[in-house]
Image (cartoon, rainbow, N blue to C red):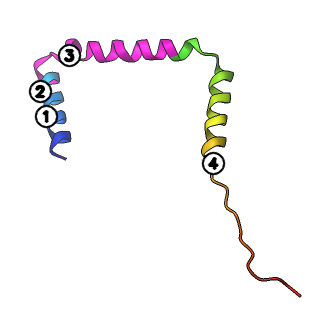
Amino acid sequence: MLRIIAWLLLTAYLITVGLWHPAATPVSTAFAGLAFLIGLVPAYAWAITAGALWWRHHHSRTVVVTETVS
């Protein structure tokens, strides 16, 4: 919690002083590069990968029957 408050205070200080844009430039550049790399992969490849990961980690519920009906 203290770390979040410290980050918010630092952000408020940088906005107030006017240093926010130079301080945020490396972060925005990194996100732009990440978006470019994600954009290189076709959407159907992301969909197939997401489906495969979901299928692999999907836990189906099984019902165990312990009594027989006569």
Q: Which mark is residue 58?
A: 4
Q: Which mark is nearer the camera, 2 or 3?
A: 3
Residue drawn at (63%, 53%) of the image: 59
Q: Nearer the viewer, residue 19 or 33?
A: 33
The Cα–Cα distance between marks 2 and 3, rounded to whole angstroms, is: 12 Å
- Residue 9 figure quarter: top left
Whether pointer 4 and pointer 2 mark residues with C-beta atoms closer than 8 Å, the reply is no
Q: Which mark is nearer the camera, 4 or 2?
A: 4
Percent x, y of residue 62: 70, 63
Toward the right, the furthest residue is 70
Whether pointer 1 and pointer 2 mark residues with C-beta atoms closer than 8 Å, the reply is yes
Relative horizontal placement of residue 26, taking residue 45 as reference (left or right)? left
Residue drawn at (71%, 68%) of the image: 63
Who comes first in sequence, dot 1 or dot 3? 1
Relative horizontal placement of residue 22, taking residue 53 as reference (left or right)? left
Q: Which residue is mark 1?
A: 9
Q: Which residue is mark 3?
A: 23
Who comes first in sequence, dot 4 or dot 2? 2
Q: Quadrant of the C terminus?
A: bottom right
Q: From the viewer's perspective, is residue 1 above or below residue 61?
A: above
Who comes first in sequence, dot 1 or dot 4? 1
- In this picture, which residue range is highlighted in magenta? 15-37
Q: Which residue is mark 2?
A: 13
